[in-house]
Amino acid sequence: MTAHKSGDPTTLNRLYGRQSGHKLRPGQQQLVDELLPAISIPEEGPITAESLFGYDRPLHFEIGFGGGEHMAYRADMLPDHGFIGCEPFLNGVVSALGHVRDQHLPNIRLHMGNALDILARIPDGALSFVYLLHPDPWPKARHAKRRMMNKGPVDMIAAKLKPGGEFRFGTDHPVYLRWALMVMNGREDFQWLCDKPEDFLKRPGGWPETRYEAKARRQGHEVWYFRWKRTEA
């Protein structure tokens, strides 16, 4: 994919390319040309609520937002909060842009690319929520180091969450389920918010079903939902 940029590093004039499954329709290309530059994360400097939205507010961060329906639902439900979404694939970004336009969501900012690059620029303790919903499971053992649920990324998530902040994770892949539990059960900086099995078998309130989750259920997959609270440790 090639990005054509102007002299201002905070703007993005036009995105082309193949991180999409099909050629964009004119209306979709217009969203990429006009709306995406207006709500994209600046390319330099610390990322704070003040820099993105003009004043302090709780910040949410979604890693790989897919089509953006979860992010849009939460942003609509919490209009006084700020939402940062990162997604590497153009189709997903276009879908999220449609939600922002159609639902009139001024509290969303997007980045098309690597979420960890953006997360690294957020001050420690600045986030209230981090979401990792149905990430690529990389099911082969030799690819395990590519999973987002690994020590390095989770260390960064822990650093960016404020004490009492929440990390939410969802998956329908049994290999990833076991891996995530192994990674998280060894940590003292997160408390698993689970008292009984039903707590991770039933979708919590305020957690909408995404298209990916609906597809998984149609394929007969079980889906698991996890919530961890950042502790003071």
Image: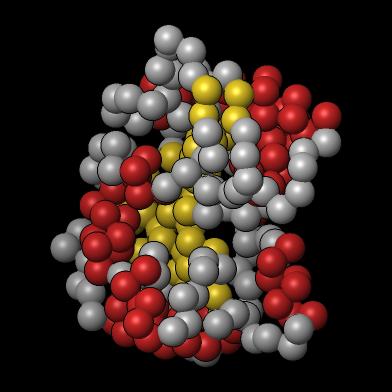
* Rendering coords of residue 145 (x, y %): 32, 73
* Rendering coords of residue 91 (x, y %): 68, 47
* Callout count: 0
Q: How is the image coloured?
A: secondary structure
186 vs 110, left or right, is left
- Eyeballing the image, is 24 above or below 114? above
**Rendering quarter of residue 156:** bottom left
Which quadrant does the C terminus fall into?
bottom left
Closest to the observer: 11 or 41?
Answer: 11
- Specify the farthest residue to the left: 233
**Rendering quarter of residue 218:** bottom right
Closest to the observer: 117 or 77?
Answer: 117
Closest to the observer: 88 or 128?
Answer: 88
Residue at image position (48%, 13%) is 6
- Specify the farthest residue to the top: 7
112 vs 214, left or right, is left
* Rendering coords of residue 10 (x, y %): 44, 18
Residue at image position (65%, 86%) is 222
- Eyeballing the image, is 49 above or below 228? above
* Rendering coords of residue 109 (x, y %): 53, 33
66 vs 103, left or right, is left
Residue 84 in view, yes or no = yes
Residue 199 in view, yes or no = no
Residue at image position (69%, 70%) is 213
- Eyeballing the image, is 127 above or below 199? above
